[in-house]
């Protein structure tokens, strides 16, 4: 399920504005007053509608997003000191970061780097591989042998321009994503866009080694040929530009998860780059969620920065 069905498209559209502000910069001071103003609500109604749509309070949503991304950066950027990661993810006290992290993940950030991440990943593998109906079963059963490095497609560093897109958020990495794409394409056609000429892009907010598939956050995006405004539950935002590590890939549902994991876990730590606090995205040439072949052809792009020396 994506956004909850008992809310109006108007509420979805307005809360999208606040969600975009949150995810645009997790290190920023994200106050209720400022977020409510962006969504054009009073602070009281903003908090009520936000929880109705997302299932979480504003505070819990921001805290979870910051901690999940910090947990990723601790692994993806192994040479970055913990206090820098804490600051990048919106924690301005090392003590408060350590307390929040341990409360959420059950171990300190330093232990997470040593063994906590691997233990959580193994626990998820054990949980999901026992599910006979789990469509990602193969992802968790086909684990790499210790010290075996995966073969990866060539990675090219590109400087990309920012892109204006219309978007719909979805919770769950599942076949229901296809319905989200159909709704987004219908929205584009209704607004006079030649949707066949627009680029389909997917933002991947969640790491499937860290977050169960039914909780992974996916954002379907369609580039805009002209200025447009959010409506009918469809948001409008800018995907940030800058340096990206890019590689082409083809496959079927689930295969992209292998590529994403291996790029972050193997290529990135060994490279001259580090992950930025921006989600990666897939730029589709063929979108397996809506085409008849059920195969994808895409360029996967990870926002990166040069490592500090």
Image: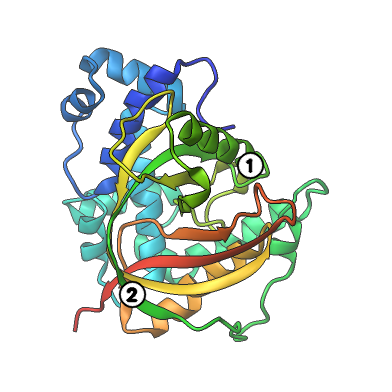
Q: Position of residue 103 (x, y in %)?
A: 39, 45
Residue in the image at 37% along x and 34% along y: 235
Evaluate whether residue 220 shows in this view.
yes
Most distant residue in the right direction: 132
Label 2 secondary element? strand
The residue to which callout 2 is attached is 158
In-image side of 239 versus 232 (left or right): left
Give the spatial CA distance, label 2 vs label 1.
29 Å
Against 170, residue 136 (above or below) is below
The residue to which callout 1 is attached is 178
The disc at residue 216 is none
Residue in the image at 56% along x and 81% along y: 152
Lower position in the chain sequence, tag 2 or tag 1? 2
Residue in the image at 45% along x and 15% along y: 8
Give the quarter of the figure containing the N terminus: top right
Against 31, residue 283 (above or below) is below
Local packing at callout 1 (Cα closer than 10 Å; few below 14, some 14-19, many 20+) is some
Label 1 secondary element? helix
Against 256, residue 97 (above or below) is above
Q: Position of residue 307 (x, y in %)?
A: 25, 79
Q: Position of residue 54 (x, y in %)?
A: 44, 28
* Residue 114, picture quadrant: bottom left
Q: Position of residue 213 (x, y in %)?
A: 61, 48
């Amino acid at each position: 399920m994506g956004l909850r069905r008992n809310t109006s498209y108007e509420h979805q559209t307005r809360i999208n504005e606040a969600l975009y502000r949150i995810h645009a910069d997790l290190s920023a001071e994200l106050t209720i007053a400022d977020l409510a103003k962006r969504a054009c609500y009073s602070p009281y109604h903003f908090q009520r509608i936000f929880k109705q749509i997302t299932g979480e309070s504003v505070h819990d949503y921001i805290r979870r997003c910051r901690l999940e991304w910090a947990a990723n950066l601790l692994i993806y950027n192994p040479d970055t000191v913990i206090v820098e990661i804490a600051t990048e993810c919106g924690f301005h006290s090392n003590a408060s970061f350590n307390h929040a992290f341990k409360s959420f993940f059950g171990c300190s950030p330093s232990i997470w780097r040593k063994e906590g991440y691997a233990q959580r990943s193994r626990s998820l593998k054990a949980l999901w591989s026992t599910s006979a109906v789990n469509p990602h079963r193969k992802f968790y059963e086909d684990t790499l042998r210790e010290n075996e490095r995966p073969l990866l497609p060539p990675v090219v560093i590109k400087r990309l321009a920012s892109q204006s897109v219309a978007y719909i958020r979805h919770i769950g990495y599942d076949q229901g994503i296809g319905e989200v794409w159909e709704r987004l394409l219908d929205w584009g056609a209704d607004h006079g866009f030649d949707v066949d000429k627009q680029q389909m892009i997917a933002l991947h907010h969640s790491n499937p080694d860290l977050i169960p598939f039914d909780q992974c956050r996916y954002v379907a995006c369609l580039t805009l040929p002209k200025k447009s405004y959010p409506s009918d539950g469809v948001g409008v935002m800018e995907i940030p530009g800058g340096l990206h590590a890019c590689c082409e890939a083809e496959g079927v549902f689930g295969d992209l998860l292998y590529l994403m994991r291996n790029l972050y876990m193997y290529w990135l730590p060994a490279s001259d780059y580090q992950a930025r606090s921006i989600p990666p995205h897939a730029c589709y040439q063929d979108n397996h969620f809506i085409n008849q072949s059920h195969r994808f052809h895409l360029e996967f792009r990870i926002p990166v920065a040069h490592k500090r020396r």
